[in-house]
Amino acid sequence: MEIDRQRKPKKVIGPFGEALSLNDLPKSNTTRWVIRRKAEVVAAVTGGLLSLEEACDRYDLSLEEFLSWQESIDKSGLPGLRISYLSKYRTEYRARQEKLEQTGSQSPRDPLADLH
């Protein structure tokens, strides 16, 4: 009996609107992670080109590292992937969270919170 396997797309839309295939992704031995490369890997996983496990194995990433890239894009867009601004965005996010807690408002539940 053949199992019906979900097919992966051959291309997905990249962070700048371009089509990305597996050949367009950063090399597996990448060590210098600039914004574009991080965003391409996140787009590949989000679009189904790579699974989360495949991306982590291929690029020797921890689950936490990949999820931090994804969370940075979700919260702050591509500028959130800048190393120099990471602490700034985290500080702003924490300040917003504290303000919400002080006013008694609840922030939307973070869907990735259980994965951290």
Image (cartoon, rainbow, N blue to C red):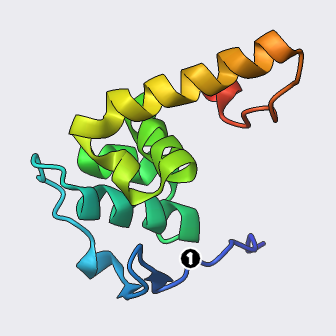
Position of 10 relative to 37 (above/below): below
Identify the secondary structure beneath mark 1: loop
State which quadrant residue 94 falls in: top right
Residue at image point 54% right, 82% down: 9
Find residue 35 and report its horizontal and vertical position in percent.
26, 57
Left-right relation of 30 to 101? left
- Quadrant (top left/top right/bottom left/bottom right) for the C terminus: top right
Q: Residue at x 74, y 70 (%)?
A: 3
Which amino acid is tagged 1?
A: Lys
Q: Please provide percent x and percent y for residue 89.
A: 43, 35
- Pick whichever, 101 or 69, lies toward us: 101
Q: Name the one closer to the observer, 72 or 63.
A: 72
**Is residue 19 among what the camera can see?**
yes
The answer to whether residue 50 is seen in the rendering is no
Residue corresponding to mark 1: 8
Q: On the picture, is 66 further left or further right than 58?
A: right
Q: Dot 1, how many residues are within 10 Å of its Cα: few (below 14), some (14-19), or many (20+)?
A: few
Between residue 76 and residue 65, name the one nearer to us: 76
Image position, residue 74 (x, y; %): 56, 51
Which residue is depicted at the point 37% across and 31% down? 88
* Residue depicted at 47% across the width and 86% down the height: 10
* Residue 19 falls left or right of residue 98: left
